[in-house]
Image: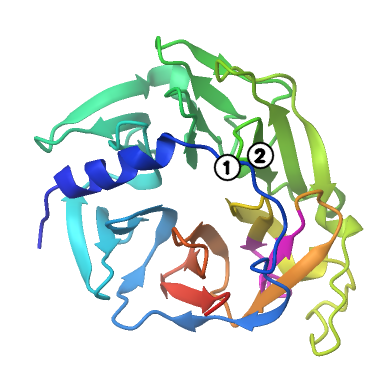
C-alpha cells in the first residue's frame, strides 16, 4: 500500500520549533534490557530509520523502498526508491533520503511524490546516514571513504576536517551544538564516536575524538561475558555503526561485522564516560538505531536481512 506524505510532513515540522535543554533524570535507561522482533515485521536490509509522529520511517534496501511502521503496528510502503540508505526530515517536515551504489545523491521527497535532487556528483561522496539542523543544514556520513559532509541552506557543500575514515552513524546533540559521527575503522583501538562543534548558522568546526569503545567497560552483575572475552565495549560492539542520541544527550551505539561482536547496543552517558545500559538479543550487524518520540522504545535494524527489533526502555 502506498500512502501520502502530507500527514508525515505536518507531524515532523513541529519537532524543529523548540529545542529544550535536557538533563539526566529518572527516565535515563540503566541496567540490562532485552530486544525482540517487532510483530509483523518483514525481513529488511535496513540502513536508516527516522521517527515521526506518524510512524517510524525505514529505508529498506532489500526491496528498494521506504516503509513506515504505524502506531497500529502495520507496515506500509511509502515509496519505491533506487537504493535508499539514510533518512531524515528537514525543518518543513519533508523527507530526505540518501542513496548510493546504483546512484549517488541526496534527494528531498515532495508532497506530489516527485524528487528534488539536493546534492549529487562529486559533492555528495558516498552518502550514508543523515542529520538535519533546525536551520536546514544537512549533514551526512560517508562510509566508506566520503568523510563527513554538509550542505548549507544556500546549497554550499563542505567536506569537514579531519576527513574521518569509515564514518557511518550521525546525529546531533539535543541542543544542536555538537554533531556526532561513528567511525567503524578496522583498527580496534580507533573505533568510537567523534564530534564536531556546531555554530548557530549550522557550520562545523574541526572534529575530534569523543570516546572510544576500548576505553569503556560495562559493569553489570548479570551481563554475560562478551564472546571474544574482551571486558571493554570493543568486545560487544565491534565496528561501530548505528548511532542515536536521546533527549538527555545519551548515546546509543551498535555495530558488528565480526563473529565475536555485535551482540548488544550500548547506552553511553552524555559525557562519554559511563556505560549506562546494555540491550541484548539484538540483530547481528546493527546498521541503524532510532528512538520513539517519547524515548520509551529503541528500534534496532540490522545490515543483514533481519526483522526490525525493538527494546522497551521504560513503561
Q: Quadrant of the N terminus?
A: bottom left
Q: Is residue 178 left or right of residue 114?
A: right
User: Residue 134: where, in percent of width, then height?
Assistant: 46, 29
- Residue 180: mark in rendering: 2
**Which numbered disc, 2 or 1, marks the residue that appears first in the sequence?**
1
User: What number of labels is visible?
Assistant: 2
Q: Residues within 10 Å of mark 1 (few under 14, many from 20)?
A: many
User: Residue 257: where, in percent of width, then height?
Assistant: 64, 63
- Residues in magenta, as a range: 254-269
Q: Is residue 264 magenta?
A: yes
Cα separation between marks 2 and 1: 5 Å
Q: Does residue 86 appear in this view?
A: yes
Q: Is residue 54 magenta?
A: no
User: Residue 151: where, in percent of width, then height?
Assistant: 46, 19
Q: Is residue 59 left or right of residue 193?
A: left
Give the secondary structure at mark 1: strand
The residue at the far bottom in this view is: 222
The answer to whether 234 is drawn above or below residue 9 in the figure is: below
Model colouring: rainbow
Pointer 2 and pointer 1: residues touching (CB < 8 Å)?
yes
* Residue at 81% across, 51% down: 272
- The residue tagged 1 is 171
The answer to whether 104 is drawn above or below residue 166 in the figure is: above
Pick the front one: 59 or 197: 197
Give the secondary structure at mark 2: strand
Q: Does residue 63 appear in this view?
A: no
Q: Residues within 10 Å of mark 2 (few under 14, many from 20)?
A: many
- Residue 266: mark in rendering: none
The answer to whether 85 is drawn above or below residue 96 in the figure is: below
Residue 236, quarter of the rendered image: bottom right
* Residue at 70% across, 66% down: 266
Amino acid at each position: 500500500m502506498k500512502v501520502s506524505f502530507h500527514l508525515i510532513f505536518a507531524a515532523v515540522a513541529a519537532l524543529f520549533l523548540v529545542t529544550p535543554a535536557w538533563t539526566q533524570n529518572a527516565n535515563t535507561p540503566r541496567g540490562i534490557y532485552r530486544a525482540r522482533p517487532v510483530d509483523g515485521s518483514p525481513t529488511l536490509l535496513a540502513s536508516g530509520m527516522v521517527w515521526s509522529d506518524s510512524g517510524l520511517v525505514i529505508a529498506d534496501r532489500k526491496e528498494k523502498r521506504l516503509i513506515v511502521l504505524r502506531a497500529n503496528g502495520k507496515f506500509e510502503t511509502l515509496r519505491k526508491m533506487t537504493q535508499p540508505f539514510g533518512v531524515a526530515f528537514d525543518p518543513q517536515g519533508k523527507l530526505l533520503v540518501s542513496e548510493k551504489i546504483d546512484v549517488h545523491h541526496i534527494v528531498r521527497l515532495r508532497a506530489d511524490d516527485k524528487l528534488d535532487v539536493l546534492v549529487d556528483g562529486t559533492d555528495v561522496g558516498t552518502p550514508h546516514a543523515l542529520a538535519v539542523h533546525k536551520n536546514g543544514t544537512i549533514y551526512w556520513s560517508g562510509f566508506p571513504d566520503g568523510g563527513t559532509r554538509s550542505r548549507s541552506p544556500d546549497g554550499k557543500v563542505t567536506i569537514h576536517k579531519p576527513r574521518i575514515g569509515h564514518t557511518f552513524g550521525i546525529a546531533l546533540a539535543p541542543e544542536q551544538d555538537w554533531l556526532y559521527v561513528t567511525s567503524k575503522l578496522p583498527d580496534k583501538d580507533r573505533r568510537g564516536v567523534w564530534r564536531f562543534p556546531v555554530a548557530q548558522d549550522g557550520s562545523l568546526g574541526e572534529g575530534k575524538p569523543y570516546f572510544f569503545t576500548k576505553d569503556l567497560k560495562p559493569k553489570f552483575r548479570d551481563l554475560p561475558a562478551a564472546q571474544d572475552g574482551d571486558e571493554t565495549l570493543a568486545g560487544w560492539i565491534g565496528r561501530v555503526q548505528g548511532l542515536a542520541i536521546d533527549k538527555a544527550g545519551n548515546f546509543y551505539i551498535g555495530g558488528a561485522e565480526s563473529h565475536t561482536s555485535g551482540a548488544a547496543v550500548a547506552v553511553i552517558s552524555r559525557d562519554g564516560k559511563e556505560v549506562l545500559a546494555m540491550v541484548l538479543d539484538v540483530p547481528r550487524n546493527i546498521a541503524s538505531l532510532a528512538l520513539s518520540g517519547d524515548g520509551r522504545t529503541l528500534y534496532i535494524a540490522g545490515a543483514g536481512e533481519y526483522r526490525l527489533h525493538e527494546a522497551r526502555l521504560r513503561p
